Image (spheres, rainbow, N blue to C red):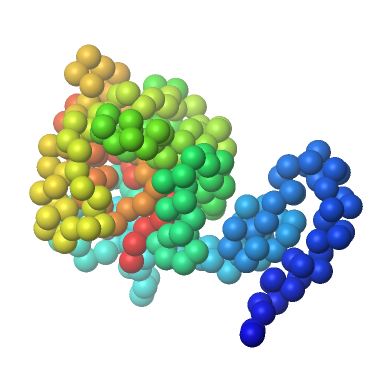
Amino acid sequence: MKVSAEYIDTMALQPLLRLIEPALRLFPSLASQCAVCHSWPARRVCAPCIGRFVQILPRCRTCALALSGGLSQCAACVRQSPPLHAAFAAVSYGFPWSELIASYKFGTDAAWASVFGELLMRAPGLSAHLAGLQADDWLLPIPLSAQRLQSRGYNQAWQLAKALGAQSGARAKSDAGLLLRIKDTPPQTRLERHARLQNVEGAFVVEPLRRAGLEGRRVVLVDDVMTSGASLFAAARALRDAGASEVTGVVFARTE
Ligand SMILES: [Zn+2]
Ligand SMILES: [Zn+2]
């Protein structure tokens, strides 16, 4: 039987860990395992794993798709300008982030929001963009439908938006009730591109009584994952139609 090196390390450490456990309880940030490599003690994702799995890639400035060859925009965005002024992503969707996002999305462990927020703050240009927001601008989550929110218990994008606001010190207001999702749609990942675009058509509206607060304001829209961009684009269009002067998309992970 092949036993992994991490497993042996953790086993060998057990007596020591029991001894220092009372002290570690005083420092909860140290008293956990890395969720990726299981090294212990570590932060939720240890520094070596961040170094290995968070690569700063050149990305399309309007949809955050990873690019090569010194381009600033992808072919799709050049062909048809998306409704986003700019887009930022921390990582490409894949191992180990896909698993961590799934456990964040469908679990109850909202603490992942601050880990993802911290990693997002490394995306080139994002902290400057957030610092440039004014007190009347908005940092908004992609909303869930009321039905989905009730079954899931919390909106992971709202947690991420709040974490990002706290970590960046942005002056913009955050609100989960300004942009609404009025159509419950099947998860985007199960649909082909064309179906995704149709799927989110008319899914988002701005709360009618609050449109005045958007007039001429800048908006940063936050979500955990961006696949085709259909949801983010539809939400951005709803905000622009309601008077927002520009909408920027910020996602933790972007598919390739
Ligand atoms: Zn690790
Ligand atoms: Zn693009």
Instruction: Give the residue displayed 81% in from the left and 69% down from the top.
Output: 12
Q: Position of residue 32 (x, y in %)?
A: 69, 51
* Name of the residue lying farthest toward the top: 209
Above or below: residue 159 compared with residue 15: above
- Depth check: 188 or 14 in front? 14
Total label count?
0
* Name of the residue lying farthest toward the bottom: 1
Instruction: Give the residue displayed 36% in from the left and 73% down from the top.
Output: 68
Instruction: Give the residue displayed 58% in from the left and 63% down from the top.
Output: 36
Residue 115 visible in the shown view = yes
Quadrant of the snapshot with the C terminus: bottom left
Q: Position of residue 193 (x, y in %)?
A: 16, 60
Above or below: residue 244 compared with residue 210: below
Q: Position of residue 222 (x, y in %)?
A: 38, 41
Judge from the rendering whether residue 204 lies leftward or rightward of residue 66; answer left or right.
Answer: left
Judge from the rendering whether residue 204 lies leftward or rightward of residue 56; answer left or right.
Answer: left
Quadrant of the snapshot with the N terminus: bottom right
- Depth check: 236 or 246 in front? 236
Q: Which quarter of the picture shows residue 50?
A: bottom right
Judge from the rendering whether residue 138 lies leftward or rightward of residue 16; answer left or right.
Answer: left
Residue 61 visible in the shown view = no
Instruction: Give the residue displayed 18% in from the left and 58% down from the top.
Output: 191
Q: Position of residue 236 (x, y in %)?
A: 24, 39
